Amino acid sequence: MFRKLSFLVLAAILVSTIAAPGISFADYKIPQTAINKILEYKTSLELTDSQYKKLGTINNVIIEKMIQVKAQAEIRKTEIDNFTADWTVMNGTAVEYTIKEYYQFLAELKSLELEAIMKAKAVMTREQLKKYADLADIESMIIKVDTELAKID
């Protein structure tokens, strides 16, 4: 009996692990970093071609890592959902371990975002960083005003 139940749980996990990335791919958004915005402001920031290439390369590498980490986090989330779907046969140790893995992947995503910022800062001049901060503040204010106006309508 236990063997059949274990087999069914493992089969369900395997199927959901294989199917989950395909199912969630339709809603999948490519992660963005702060570098994406910097690249959009190329002209305003007066980025050199060399800076633009370096930032693009850094961004692509970090986004690739983020995609892999995000996929692993989504797999863990699916496993957690499957483990906790039937509380009568739930293995608490397995759930706890998977939850820890899930949050480790989320922490890694945040670390990659920070890595992108630190690497971008190393490529840009002080003046460009200041100008970027100003541009980001202006964009933030515009978004805030648009949000408030949308509430009024």
Image (tube, helix red, strand yellow):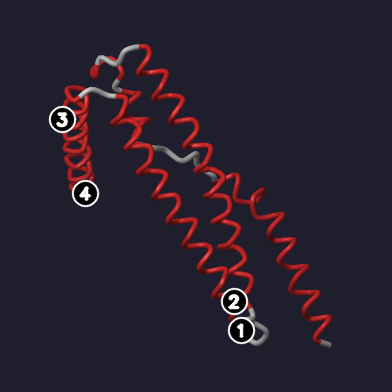
Q: Amino acid at mark 2?
A: Thr
Asked if marks 1 and 2 touch (Cβ < 8 Å), the reply is: yes
Which numbered disc, 2 or 4, marks the residue that appears first in the sequence?
Answer: 2
- Residue 32 vs 47, above or below: the answer is below
Residue name at image x 78 percent, y 68 percent: 11
Which numbered disc, 4 or 3, marks the residue that appears first in the sequence?
Answer: 3
Asked if marks 4 and 3 touch (Cβ < 8 Å), the reply is: no
Q: Which mark is residue 10?
A: none
Residue 64: give x, y in percent of width and height. Answer: 53, 37
- As measured in the structure, the alpha-carbon distance from the residue carrying label 4 to the one carrying label 1 is 42 Å
User: Disc 4 or disc 1, which is closer to the eye?
Assistant: 1
Tag 4 secondary structure: helix
Q: Mark 4 — residue?
A: 151
Q: Which mark is residue 134?
A: 3
Number of on-image labels: 4
Q: Mark 1 — residue?
A: 87
Tag 3 secondary structure: helix
Q: Residues within 10 Å of mark 4 (few under 14, many from 20)?
A: few
In the shown orientation, is residue 86 left or right of residue 65?
right
- Residue 87 vs 14, above or below: the answer is below
Which numbered disc, 3 or 1, marks the residue that appears first in the sequence?
Answer: 1
Nearest the viewer among 122 and 16 is 122
Residue name at image x 44 percent, y 49 percent: 109
Nearest the viewer among 92 and 150 is 92
Nearest the viewer among 142 and 60 is 60
- As measured in the structure, the alpha-carbon distance from the residue carrying label 3 to the one carrying label 1 is 52 Å
